[in-house]
Amino acid sequence: MDISKILDLIYQIPEQSKLTIQNNVNEIAFPKGHILLKANKIESNIYFIKKGLVRAFIERDNEVTFWFGKEGETVISMKSYVEDQPGYENIELLEDCELYELKTENLRKLFSEDVHIANWGRKFAEKELIKTEERLISKQFKNASERYLELMKDHPELIKRVQLGHIASYLGITQVSLSRIRAELK
Amino acid sequence: MDISKILDLIYQIPEQSKLTIQNNVNEIAFPKGHILLKANKIESNIYFIKKGLVRAFIERDNEVTFWFGKEGETVISMKSYVEDQPGYENIELLEDCELYELKTENLRKLFSEDVHIANWGRKFAEKELIKTEERLISKQFKNASERYLELMKDHPELIKRVQLGHIASYLGITQVSLSRIRAELK
DNA sequence: TTCATTTTTTATCATTTGTTAAATTTTTTC
DNA sequence: GAAAAAATTTAACAAATGATAAAAAATGAA
């Protein structure tokens, strides 16, 4: 998915403002397994996924995946982006990826100069917020089995592209539990 | 907490822009028990809490509290605000409240006209996003007992101001479980 | 293909949380 | 302050999920 389409999907703004963002974007590529973003480090870029699949995970005793990003989605350490603080997430590429890279510093400058870009940034945060809120509510209302069915419904391709251990930890359960749930669904 | 302080806490912008927002704000008050915001309805206002305490809850078989708001916080149906869609939350006043009311429609107009206000709106969404993300991660990493301790640490006053049934459902457990957890901590 | 490695499933038992009901404590109302 | 109502705790048992280990299946490399 090309950068113009990605920016539009977040929020449509005048062509001129969009070009201004695009002029600050570099294309890069990394292989499967690459760690794009490291925890406990202030991250100075955000990335848009042109092609591929990534996961965000947090390391404690175990490794917990809490987000997947695919074509068209934005890879970002919210803590770095919003608060200039080290984030807690690592981002690992689950497939070979092509990415668009944008310096947070440059984006901040654009926010202060162009009202359309500021509103684009607002919409970006608002949409991410809605998604995060929906996941929180899903966790509060649904048991593991219902959450798995919901994921299959909303993102069927993920089940195919991602190994089950990651899916399980995204759902907040162990892989063994997920296997059990899958067995019961048959 | 007065409106000027509340707006500043979200993000500091030039006095003139802040006054523009303030000019669109009305003060209102409601008694404890009032339902400020109803589910399945497009909400046309947002509110800032000058004084008091509220909760957001969702009704299914049971009633699940998923947010508390106190002085300085913003009452908002994200679905209405962001997507112009009916939201899923009811907002109930847990104490007599004094509120500042702001029409979403007016705010949207300000976003499009004033880059400072657009960036204020961006910061608002970003900060809410960080908070929601932290709660999601807390739910993914911590068991009920740890989440209760975390809540006591971060918001000790809530435990005093809110009845335990609401706290339990906020933590994603039953009231009976919360009682058990509290008994074990003694 | 074949062997080694990784992923997924199955089985068993332990722990956590849920459900229901009753007892106790606290708050509200008259 | 006493009675009624609401909130909280306790108890007993059920259901869901976790932990560990082993078996089976799938994947990858030589």
Image (spheres, coloured by chain):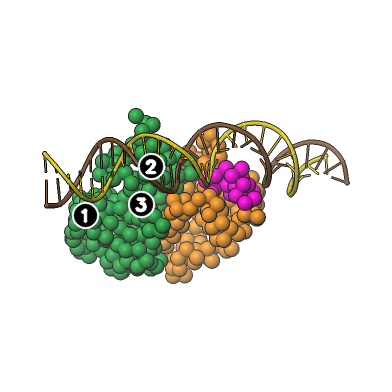
Chain colours: A green, B orange, C yellow, D brown
Question: Which numbered tag is attached to residue A176?
Answer: 2
**A90 within the magenta span:** no
Label 3: element kind: strand
The residue that label 3 is drawn on is A65
Labels 1 and 2: the sequence-earlier one = 1
**B183 within the magenta span:** yes
Q: Nearer the viewer, residue D1 or A72?
A: D1
* Residue A10 seen: no
Instruction: Tell me which secondary structure the magenta stretch mostly adopts.
Output: helix
Label 1: element kind: loop
> Which quarter of the figure has residue A38?
bottom left
Q: Which residues are magenta?
A: B163-184
Labels 2 and 3: the sequence-earlier one = 3
Rendering coords of residue A177 (x, y %): 40, 41
* Residue A1 seen: yes
> Which quarter of the figure has residue A35?
bottom left
